[in-house]
Image (spheres, helix red, strand yellow):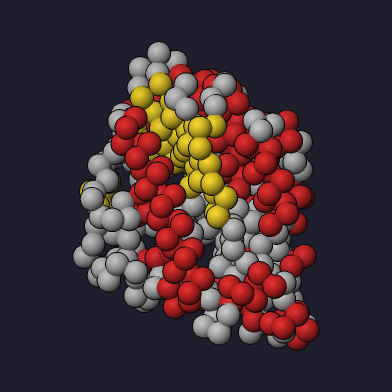
Amino acid sequence: MAEILGLGLSHYPPLCLPDAEMSSLLRWTLEDPSIPAAEKDVAKWPAAMQAEWADDLGTRAAAAHRKALVAGFERVRAALDAFRPDVVVIWGDDQYENFKEDVIPPFAVLAFDDLDLYPWGHAETSSMMKGKANAWGEDASKHYRLRGRPDIARHLATGLLERDIDVAYAYKPLHHGSIAHAFTNTILYLDYHRRGYDYPTICFPLNCYGRRVVSCRGFLTHMDAPLEFDPPSPSPKRFMQVGAATARVLKESPWRVALIASSSWSHAFLCDATWRLRPDTPADRRLYEAMRAGDFATWRATPLKAVEDAGQQELLNWFALAGAMEELGARLEWSEFVETHVLNSNKVFAVYGTA
C-alpha cells in the first residue's frame, strides 16, 4: 500500500517581487475611483493595517512577511525531503493561463511528460511577473527540467473516473508554455534558496475562480467594472469529494505520494466586504481553527457563496486537501497562520502526518 503525505502552502505571486513592490496590489486598488475616498483614507484603517503600511507603503512589513513565508516554505520542504516521494501532486488554480475560453474544466489531471519550466521566460502567461524584476535577480534563462510521471497521472485519472469523478486530463499544455503560476511558484518557493527541485510532479488544476475565471481573466478588476459572470466553480463539498477520491485511488497504489494544496487564503482583491483593501481575516481564522481541530464538517458545510464573499476562491484547493486528509485519517502535525493586512492575503502552512 502507498504512503501519502499532506502539505499546504501558498504560491503568493508578489513574493517573487522585491520587498518594495510587494504591496503593489493594494497600491493598484487605492487608485480605483469606484472605492469611496473615506475607505482609502489610511487614518481610518484598522490600527494593525496602518502599522503595516507605515511610512514606506508596507516595505518593512513585506520584509518581515517574506521572512515568515520563507521559514514556512523551508519547514514544508524539510517534510517533503524527509518523505522522499515518488511523485508530488499539486492542487492549484488556473487563472486564465492554460485554460481559457475554449475550455474551463472543473478539475483536470495534467499527465505531462518531462518539460522545461522557465519561470520568467513564460511570465507573459503567468500572473503579475511579465516584464518585472524578481527577488532572485534571475533572467529568462532560469529554468527547471520538471520531471513528469504520466503513468501515475493516467492511473490517477483512470481511478477517479472509475469512482464517478468526471475529471478531465491532458497530455500537453494548451495556452501556456509550461504550467500555470500556481504550480510554478510552488516549485520556486519550495526551492527558495535554489538548492534544486527534482521530484516528479503532477499538476492537478482546479477551477477555483469560477464566475471570474474568464470574465475577470482570473485576476483584478475595478469594483464597478461591468461584468458578465461565468458559471460557478464546483462547490466546496465537491472539491472535498475530489480530494477524498484522489486519496483512495493513490492509497491503493504502490507509490509514495505527496499531496500539496497551493494557495493563499482570502484575497483582498476579491473581497468586496472590505472594499478590496484587506483580506477577510475572520473568515480565514474560522476555517483555520476548524482545520486545527480536525473539524472537517465545518469545511464541508461551507457554501460556495461564503467562499466567494470572503474572497477565498483559491482556498478551494485546500478543500481538496481537507477531503483527502479526512479520508486518510491523517493528523495535522504542524501549521502556521501568517497574517497580513496590506499584502493581499493571509497565508497558511500545513504538514500532515503520513497515512
Count of all numbered marks drawn on residues in the image: 0
Residue at 53%, 58% (x, y): give it: 95
Q: Nearer the viewer, residue 255 or 166?
A: 255
Residue 174 image point, x, y percent: 41, 52
Pick out the residue farthest to the top. Answer: 1
Residue 322 image point, x, y percent: 59, 34
Q: Nearer the viewer, residue 170 or 18?
A: 18
Q: Is residue 198 above or below residue 327?
A: below
Q: Is residue 302 above or below residue 125?
A: above
The image quadrant where one finds the N terminus is top left
Q: Nearer the viewer, residue 294 or 68?
A: 68
Is residue 185 something one can see in this rendering? Answer: no
Residue at 58%, 73% (x, y): give it: 52
- The answer to which image quadrant residue 310 occupies is bottom right
Residue at 32%, 61% (x, y): give it: 119
Query: Relative to 287, is 350 on the left or the right?
Result: left
Residue 153 image point, x, y percent: 39, 31
- The answer to which image quadrant residue 211 occupies is bottom right
Q: Is residue 2 above or below residue 153?
A: above
Residue 158 image point, x, y percent: 46, 24
Q: Nearer the viewer, residue 5 or 302?
A: 5
Residue at 76%, 50% (x, y): give it: 306
Query: Relative to 170, is 269 on the left or the right?
Result: right
Is residue 256 something one can see in this rendering? Answer: yes
